[in-house]
Amino acid sequence: MKKERFTCKKCGKTIGGHNQYLHDGMCDECFFDTYFPEDAQIYEKDAGKLLHICRKSEKKNMRFKNFLKSGDLDQKRFDIIVKEITEKIDCTACGNCCKILKTGVSTDDINRIAKHLHMPVDDFIKKYVTKNSEDLVEFKHVPCSFLQEDNTCQIYEVRPQECRDYPYLDKDVTTRCIQFFGNAEICPIVFNVLENAKKEFLEDIYVNL
């Protein structure tokens, strides 16, 4: 018997029978774009309020953390939330991560930034770099020495890799739960991703209780 082959009626990707019959002939991405359009909400942008709100929501957050650890997170749906929230929040309206976190820096980061600033590497290290109690190399000052008054970065084009990666929402949050929930207390983007994800996956969360 010849095996049936289906393609998404919107984008042409190959799909299985599940998508053909239960997702209206569409791949997951097109199905959710069609029937669950962008509707991520911004609940709070004031970074100064995030810790208090997270502490008040500890029970709900713990349920969501347990759900993440269950391995049942639909990563595509989660990524849609991340995309929507990231597009709605301007980091330069906040800059909280640069104000309260110390950024780890690698040798490559140091060399690249020193060159950009036309400084000898040794002078750059002496002025801007230190080692913490765990012997990890990081920027010396908080707020960051390169954070400007308008919350932009003086060295944005050559910023450390850790800055480029923050707040790590392109990583697998199911294996980085502590980091994810910690960042929700600091970063409005992560906080609003968390709040929207708790709503989006509400039924899944309680199925896993």
Image: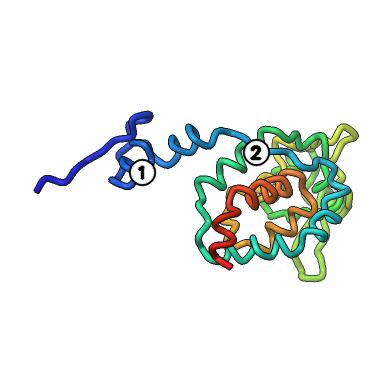
Q: Quadrant of residue 172?
A: bottom right
| Pointer 1 residue | 22
**97 shown above or below 181:** above
**Marks 1 and 2, the one that precedes in the sequence:** 1
Residue 189, percent across and down?
72, 44
Q: CA distance from mark 1 to mark 2?
A: 24 Å
Estimate the x, y position of residue 173 in percent, counting from the top left: 60, 57
**Tag count:** 2
Q: Nearer the viewer, residue 184 or 155?
A: 184
Could you tell me the amino acid type at mark 1? Leu
Q: Residue at x 73, y 49 (%)?
A: 191
Please say whether residue 22 is visible from this viewpoint: yes
Horizontal side of 18 relative to 74 (left or right) equals left
Q: Residue at x 33, y 36 (%)?
A: 25
In the picture, the disc for residue 71 is: none
Regarding mark 1 in the picture, which secondary structure is present there?
helix
Please, which residue is most extreme toward the left here?
1
* Residue lying at 87% horizontally and 45% vertically, measured from the top left: 145
Seen in the picture, residue 68 relative to 121 is either above or below; the reply is: below
Label ID, residue 40:
2
Q: Amino acid at mark 2?
A: Ala
